[in-house]
């Protein structure tokens, strides 16, 4: 009995028997662009808090500034919506990698799982940042402990560093490995992901998370441009991909 690897089309409703993208998947790169935009805008709003070494007077002024706290809350909601948009992008990324990788899709699944964890951690971080503004502005809590204002925002940044940073690193490395093996996306995008992953390793002050955002934004544009070239305006046929399988031949 011999074992051989062949390329066979997956089941589909199309006559050609190939896997086709749904509209939700085809336009999922827009989710990546929305993710970057919402994260940038949200960061400017949610991060507008006193520094950990701020004086008691500055913190008291912040606690009485409802407008500033409202901005913090809006920024946190933008982060959460951005995390949901990232999950939309992740659907397309995972499916493209999975179809190209074949086999058990270990790296594709790793990228997807790490991306889901990344989105979850980002949501928790948003809640941490917005805890005091929400309590004071929307729940009329008599918060007077300056240490809460000093500690909670750095805790949110630490969650991004330990959770978001390392989960994002896994997304980048797993994706880059599949790209380099299969060329499902341009190879330069894989090398850019590796550079961004290295930056995340050395992230100690919550600054280098921006390379991840940059990579997601660029990858989203690349996906949209490739789709536009394959299916120009007026073309109705969606993308189709072969998938790999093992066949036992007697």
Image: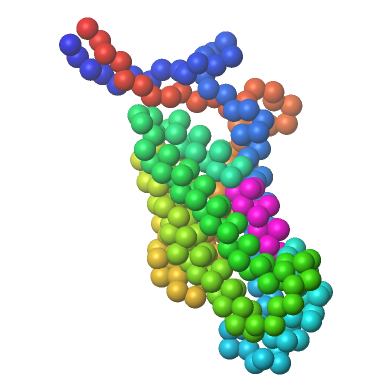
Q: Quadrant of the N terminus?
A: top left
Identity of the residue drawn at 50% across and 16% down: 11
The residue lying toward the viewer, choosing from 215 and 114, is 114
Q: Quadrant of residue 39?
A: bottom right
**Which residue is most to the left?**
1
**Which residue is most to the front?**
142
Residue 97 appears at what percent x and percent y?
46, 37
Identity of the residue drawn at 43% across and 24% down: 243
Q: Quadrant of the C terminus?
A: top left
79 within the magenta span: yes
**Which residue is most to the top?**
250
Residue 95 appears at what percent x and percent y?
51, 34
Identity of the residue drawn at 63% across and 62% down: 127
Residue 168 appears at what percent x and percent y?
47, 56
Where 90 falls versus 81 (above or below)?
above
Predominant secondary structure, magenta span: helix
The residue lying toward the viewer, choosing from 21 and 91, is 91
Image check: 180 left or right of 144?
Answer: left
Identity of the residue drawn at 45% across and 74% down: 204
Image check: 135 left or right of 149?
Answer: right
């Amino acid at each position: 009995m011999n074992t051989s690897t062949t390329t066979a089309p997956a089941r589909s409703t199309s006559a050609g028997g190939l896997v086709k993208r749904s509209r939700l998947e085809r336009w999922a790169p827009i989710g990546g662009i929305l993710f970057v935009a919402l994260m940038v805008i949200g960061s400017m709003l949610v991060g507008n808090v006193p520094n950990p070494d701020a004086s008691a007077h500055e913190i008291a002024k912040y606690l009485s500034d409802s407008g500033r706290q409202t901005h913090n809350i809006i920024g946190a909601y933008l982060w959460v919506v951005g995390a949901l948009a990232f999950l939309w992008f992740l659907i397309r990324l995972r499916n493209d990698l999975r179809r190209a990788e074949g086999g058990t899709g270990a790296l594709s699944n790793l990228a997807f799982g790490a991306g889901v964890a990344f989105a979850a951690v980002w949501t928790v971080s948003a809640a941490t940042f917005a805890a005091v503004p929400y309590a004071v502005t929307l729940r009329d809590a008599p918060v007077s402990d300056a240490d809460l204002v000093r500690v909670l925002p750095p805790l949110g940044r630490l969650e991004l560093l330990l959770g978001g940073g390392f989960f994002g690193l896994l997304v980048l490395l797993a994706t880059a490995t599949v790209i380099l093996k299969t060329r499902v996306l341009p190879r330069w995008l894989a090398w850019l992901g590796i550079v961004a992953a290295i930056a995340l390793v050395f992230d100690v002050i919550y600054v280098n998370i921006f390379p991840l955002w940059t990579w997601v934004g660029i990858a989203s544009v690349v996906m949209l441009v490739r789709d536009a070239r394959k299916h120009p305006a007026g073309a109705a046929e969606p993308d189709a991909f072969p998938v790999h399988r093992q066949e036992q031949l007697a």
